[in-house]
Image: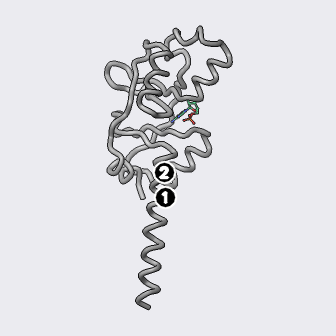
Amino acid sequence: MTVGRILATKGHDVVTIEPQRSVADGAALLARKGIGAIVVTDPEGRVRGIFSERDLVRLLAAKGAVALQEPISDWMTQDVVTTCARASVHSLMEQMTTGRFRHLPVLEDDKLVGIVSIGDVVKQRLAEMEQEQQALREYIATA
Ligand code: AMP
């Protein structure tokens, strides 16, 4: 199973924000879209960082609500780990476990073509397990 198969099911939409926008704008976007992370991109669409709900919690704990007016680029993670459509879901799970994060932007030729969250991976694995169980049931019934 590949990352491309997950994107084929969930779609290629990625919620992004420009680096100079405020943390408050980022938080509002996370809430409005019901997601856990947004990708920070420059005007050319290149990935500059990622900002997740964990970053928001950390900054509120460290600086309080006053930090909500600061640019999101000051609080995003700059070294973004990415994946590609050809990558296996297994390698994705390893990356998330090792890096201790739950979101992986998908790039093709440096272009953002999707994002996969740990929730997408779990959903995919459950669907696969159900298919395997069904195939086994059918095999047993006809054996
Ligand atoms: P998350 O588990 O995705 O909410 O993110 C936990 C922390 O890892 C936050 O500081 C994020 O900014 C950071 N993070 C999330 N996804 C990535 C990624 N793909 N590459 C690097 N850092 C990330």
- Looking at the rendered image, the quarter that the N terminus falls into is bottom left
Asked if labels 1 and 2 touch by Cβ distance under 8 angstroms, the answer is yes
Residue 17 at what x, y percent from top left? 40, 22
Which quadrant of the structure image shows residue 2?
Answer: bottom left
- Looking at the rendered image, the quarter that the C terminus falls into is bottom left
Q: How far apart are the two marked residues, 2 and 1, measured between alpha carbons?
A: 6 Å
The secondary element bearing badge 2 is classed as helix
State the residue position of label 1. 125
Residue 58 located left or right of residue 115: right
| Amino acid at pointer 2 | Val
Model colouring: one colour
Q: Is residue 36 above or below residue 27?
A: below
Q: Is residue 99 above or below residue 24?
A: below
Question: Ligand 1, what quadrant?
Answer: top right
Which residue in the rendered view is the most extreme toward the right?
62
The crowd level at tag 1 (other Cα within 10 Å; few <14, some 14-19, many 20+) is some
State the residue position of label 2. 121
Q: Nearer the viewer, residue 82 or 21?
A: 21
The crowd level at tag 2 (other Cα within 10 Å; few <14, some 14-19, many 20+) is some
Q: Which residue is located at x 59 percent, y 8 percent?
A: 66
The secondary element bearing badge 1 is classed as helix
Q: Which residue is located at x 51 percent, y 55 percent?
A: 90
Residue 123 at what x, y percent from top left? 47, 53
Q: Is residue 15 above or below residue 84?
A: above
| Amino acid at pointer 1 | Arg
Which residue in the rendered view is the most extreme toward the bottom?
143
Q: Which residue is located at x 43 percent, y 68 percent?
A: 131
Q: Nearer the viewer, residue 3 or 127?
A: 127
Residue 37 at what x, y percent from top left? 49, 31
Q: Which residue is located at x 50 percent, y 46 percent?
A: 119
* Numbered label attached to residue 72: none
Residue 68 located left or right of residue 108: right
